Amino acid sequence: MLSKSWNVRCLAVGLLLLGTLGAGACKKGLPLVGRGSSAPPPRTDALFLAEAPAVVPEELAPEFDAMGIRRLYVVAATLTGGGQVRPFPPPPNAIQRPVVLVLMGEPGAEGALRTAQPELVGETWADGAVRLVAEAKSWAQVSGVHIHILPTPADAPALAKALSAVKSRLKGLTVSVTLLPGAPEGTWEPLEGAADEALVFSFGRRPETSDTFVREMSQEEAKSFPIPFRLLFVPGGYGVAGVGAKARRLADGEIDKLSEDRNLDFDFAAVLSSEPGSIYNFKPRAGYERSKSVLSEDGGRARFDILPFADLVRLVSETSRWSAPKLAGRVFLLDGVPRDGRLSGYPAIRALLTGKPWEPSLSVEPAEGTGRGGEVWLRVSNPGPTPSELSRFGNQITIRLEGGVFTALGAGEFDRYEIFASARDMKQPAPFGRATACRLFENFFAPEEANVVGPIRIAGGRPRAFVSYQLTLPDGRTLTGAETEVAISPPPSPTKAPKEKAKKQPSIPKLKKR
């Protein structure tokens, strides 16, 4: 019978031989026993700046670091239907972050792929891209060139030939293209070796999508995607004012201004539509059709199709858990930084990527340095980077009095108010002098908007005021704020009237002595 020490020595020799074989396998490039494929590179995030020329303030660099933004896609030129590259003016300052130059396709630019010789189309693209890269070296650390067109699945073979021509001319730079999700499996396999990456447009809408929302990419499609790709998200929305040739697009940030126009009304078409998100229709208020409004030159009408930011948050959360080996990260398309006129712009993306609160909320506090005796002034603000829902009654402030009544109320920037005899019955109106409760309504709270209410004049022996609020979110949820007491400026103490001094009798003139 073999001794235990002999078994131990045999085991040690076996392990040594296995290690030697493993080392040799490493030197020869052979796989080790039980060794899987290398892990995919870590996923990173990027911003796509659609306005040209791009303006990127240097002070945003720490924020980009905190957000995990590793590169910027910057629109540097348009791409015509004939394949010509027409550069925009350069940015006013150098961009201190790796830049991918974007060739923004004009409407129908992808149609050039349907010619008999797509290789020549690629050569034309490459000629312009090479010049663009050379000119951009003065203001950017160029890492790649991106072609933003929307080819159809049938364009895949021609697109591969065109991109191969571009890639052969841009040594050391990445070449990428925008694609739409939903193509049959295997459609984009011709792009292997021709493109380094793809941006798969998976959220939002743009003029190049014919103003329709794109479908979300599915996890099943992501798992089988043939080349490295990033998900392209467009959080900002817009509307269309006017009709026909005079129609124009409005950034959804204009909703705040339109909601405050007294000559305009609005309704909601989403309940009658199969389209995703919310649909807001602005139109002349009944009886004010001939009155001037913000939309007078557009026929008085505008329609906004908006996806709530909560939908993007859900999609970002879901895709972060995807097991898709070719998924390289996410790209958020904005018009500009730090502001771009959109309701869900850079501040909202910054909050999302840094783990800060992104939902709207309300803060109600006394306005500093205002008010006389017996008055209340309030500052009502939405500190969040996203808006409330557009609503006639869903966004409201309630003020309740104890031991006093309202004698006057300045609604400030709120749209309207109602006063009631009692907070227990908010259906019975009451006049000033008898009202002890009031409600102020705001149609819409824009991101970081602040309204001042006052003066709210109160009479009573020792009155007390309490404030609560309700805020409706774009996804239909409702936030309520607990009732809190706010201070009322004490009335000035009555001043005593000064006593009038008794008038002295005029002295009797002395008689002259004779």
Image (cartoon, helix red, strand yellow):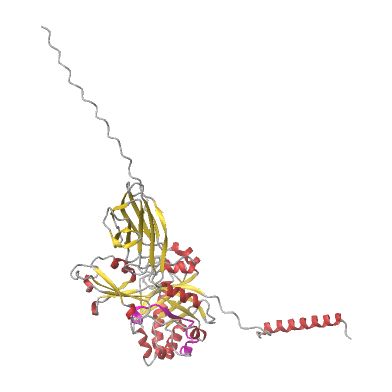
The quadrant of the rendering that contains the N terminus is bottom right
- Observer-nearest of 38 and 121: 38
Whether residue 301 is situated above or below residue 28 in the rendered picture:
above
Furthest residue toward bottom: 116
Let me know if residue 204 is in the magenta part: yes
Residue depicted at 35% across the width and 71% down the height: 89
The percent coordinates of residue 186 (x first, y second) are 48, 90
The quadrant of the rendering that contains the C terminus is top left
- Observer-nearest of 280 and 71: 280
Q: Quadrant of residue 454?
A: bottom left
Residue depicted at 31% across the width and 61% down the height: 414
Residue 310 can be seen in this image = yes
The percent coordinates of residue 56 (x first, y second) are 41, 66
Total marks placed: 0
Furthest residue toward top: 514
Q: Which residues are magenta?
A: 187-211
- Observer-nearest of 508 and 465: 465
Q: Quadrant of residue 494?
A: top left
Whether residue 492 is situated above or below residue 398 in the rendered picture:
above
- Observer-nearest of 165 and 35: 35
